[in-house]
Amino acid sequence: MTDFQVTLLLALAVGIILGFIFQRGQFCMTLMLTESTLFRNHRRLTGLILAVLVSVILFNISVSLGLRDRLNLLKSIDVDPAFFQAPLVIERSLVGGLVFGIGMILAGGCVAGILFRIGEGQLSSAISFLGLMAGFGLAMTLEVLGILGPEVSLSTSGTLLPQILQVSSAPLVILAAAFLLAILAALYRGGRIILVIIMFMLSIALATVLYYERTQIVQPTAPPLQLTGDQIEIDRFINDFHVTVSNRSSSKAVSFFTNDAVMVPPGGTILRNASMIKRYYEEEFTRYHQYIVYGRPSRIEVIDGRATAIYSSGLRAWTLGATQPPYIPYRETFTLIRQGDSWKIESLVMTARGAE
């Protein structure tokens, strides 16, 4: 039996067990919120809060012990789990969460509730499920057409909150636990003892954060590059180039180059003219479902109608169902020449960061 078959059987077993538990416990976010808000019955909501609390603690223990990747079923079949984790785009998350919440109320259940009600034979839940699939299909279609793209995130897929904030996970776990216990204390009367415990845990968390920040060696970061005159024009030109590549338009992307331009992608292949560069982008855009490039200038020098620009850039490229890395950092070195009222790229060398 192959690893894929074993993983498939394990996933099927876990799905059957969870489906049984969800149906027997009537696990549904809409039902939980409705019971808690309208009928003051907090039993199901309390179970959810405790489940989240246990999950937070166990997950962070697995991360600290290095077990997160080892216990991931996707790793066993060489699928990068980060592929299924969308980048953090705050405005989309807020709007999407609001729309999804309204949809849950109209459908009378969350995704889990709709699924187990279908198993119970409720036709209305089956119709809601079809609407859910139609929404997924519409979102993917808009993404493929470039209407929703390009995605630009403050962090790469799979990045954990402690890595974003650059702090230890311990105070964040304590704060999360205190927050969840505070919700429980607010749901039930006579929670004075719990509130005392919460205040004690918050004090420990605050002291831990302050101590961590006091002992943390802060590395100086380079100030943002101050651009003037032609540098601003070049930066806009290169940003337009990145957006064009992110929209996967090979004909428009090659228009940024001179006819005899030279381009060296991260793989090291030398492309010696515009037709070769266009063919390269056509192949790349065909291979990938998403191809997103963005960068910031490290140095821009302009002398007599010629310029050199160095950018710290990143590429997020992947295909549905493939195992492409979600983020590739590299350095772009441009040489440009002014032709008329615009700039053109004479050469572009892309070097993987760390291999300069």
Image (cartoon, helix red, strand yellow):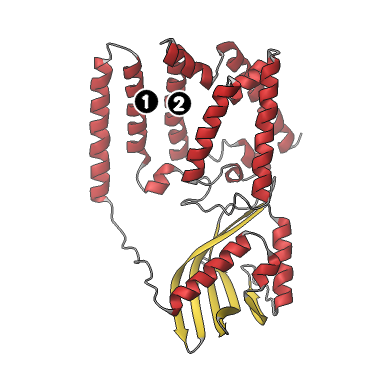
Closer to us: 109 or 310: 109
User: Is residue 31 visible to the viewer in this orientation of the structure?
Assistant: yes
Dot 2, how many residues are within 10 Å of its Cα: few (below 14), some (14-19), or many (20+)? some
Q: Establish if 219 lies above or below 263.
A: above
Q: Establish if 195 lies above or below 83.
A: above
| Secondary structure of residue under mark 2 | helix
Residue at 65% across, 16% down: 117
| Secondary structure of residue under mark 1 | helix
Residue 271 coordinates in the image, percent (x, y): 69, 76
User: Is residue 356 visible to the viewer in this orientation of the structure?
Assistant: no
Dot 1, how many residues are within 10 Å of its Cα: few (below 14), some (14-19), or many (20+)? some
Residue type for callout 2: Val
- Is the residue under label 2 in contact with that under label 1 (CB below 8 Å)? yes
Q: Quadrant of the N terminus?
A: top right
Q: Quadrant of residue 179?
A: top left
Task: Kindly identify which residue carries mark 1.
Answer: 180
Task: Kindly identify which residue carries mark 2.
Answer: 52
Residue 144 coordinates in the image, percent (x, y): 68, 50
Mark nearer the N terminus (1 vs 2):
2
Q: Establish if 301 lies above or below 38.
A: below
Q: Which mark is residue 101?
A: none
Q: Viewed as shown, does residue 210 lie left or right of 142?
A: left
